[in-house]
Amino acid sequence: PRQTSSTTDSNPMCSYPCEYLTVQEIHSIRLVSRKLYSVSQLLMACYGLPLLFGILWILMESFTVLYFTIYFSGIDQLSILYVFGSLYHLLFLFLLTSVCHATVDASKDCMVHVQTLLLYSELPNEVLEQLREMSLHSGWFRIEFSVCGWFSINLPFFCSVVGVIVTYF
């Protein structure tokens, strides 16, 4: 069984963390990482255009509802219902962007941990080689969620959408 302490091994010659992975585990993580990249690319290829239309629909709906509520209909029960509908769609957009943002951040954090492990020269050569390969491939296979390659779906994008809506009203 693997030790779970975050200190060094009981062996005084060992100065790297005990929870380092074996060669097979690192190779498995590389395979999973590659599959996750493939799945993210497949998702964006299949749902990029519908996602673009959905985002445009949320923007146009928010503009229209706010414009007619503020300038024409005043505040009545129907307009309040429409405003809450727009807020509900913006909440959905927030959840979508936050999940995409968290996924990309987790992928980047994984590579930071790989780089940290590469600093330990006491790791076995096979482990170091797998970590170097993983680090090299991380530059080629970056997980990113974008809409048809035009813009990334992340929290700064959501803030931009909210900023556009607030700016025009």
Image: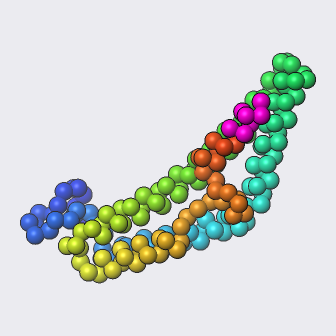
Q: Magenta segment: does it hold 69?
A: no
State whether residue 133 is above or below residue 163: below
Instruction: Please name the residue shown 85% across and 25% down the image.
Output: 69
Please say whether residue 27 is visible from this viewpoint: no
Instruction: Please name the residue shown 60% across and 68% down the image.
Output: 39
The image quadrant that residue 24 belongs to is bottom left
The answer to whether 79 appears left or right of 109 in the picture is right
Closer to the camera, 83 or 167?
167
Please say whether residue 72 is visible from this viewpoint: yes
Q: Position of residue 155 (x, y in %)?
A: 59, 46
State whether residue 55 is above or below residue 36: above
User: Looking at the image, what colour scheme do you see?
Assistant: rainbow
Which quarter of the rendering shows the N terminus?
bottom left
| Main SS of residues in magenta | helix
Instruction: Please name the residue shown 53% across and 56% down the image.
Output: 103
State whether residue 152 is above or below residue 35: above
Instruction: Please name the residue shown 79% across and 48% down the image.
Output: 56
The answer to whether 110 appears left or right of 93 in the picture is left
Q: Of all residues shown, which one is farthest toward the right?
A: 72
Closer to the camera, 41 or 25?
41
Query: What span is in magenta?
Result: 162-169
Which quarter of the rendering shows the C terminus?
top right
The answer to whether 15 appears left or right of 125 in the picture is left
Q: Of all residues shown, which one is farthest toward the front?
A: 167
The answer to whether 37 appears left or right of 165 in the picture is left
Q: Position of residue 108 (x, y in %)?
A: 46, 60
Q: Position of residue 120 (x, y in %)?
A: 24, 68
Q: Position of residue 93 (x, y in %)?
A: 68, 44
Q: How many marks?
A: 0
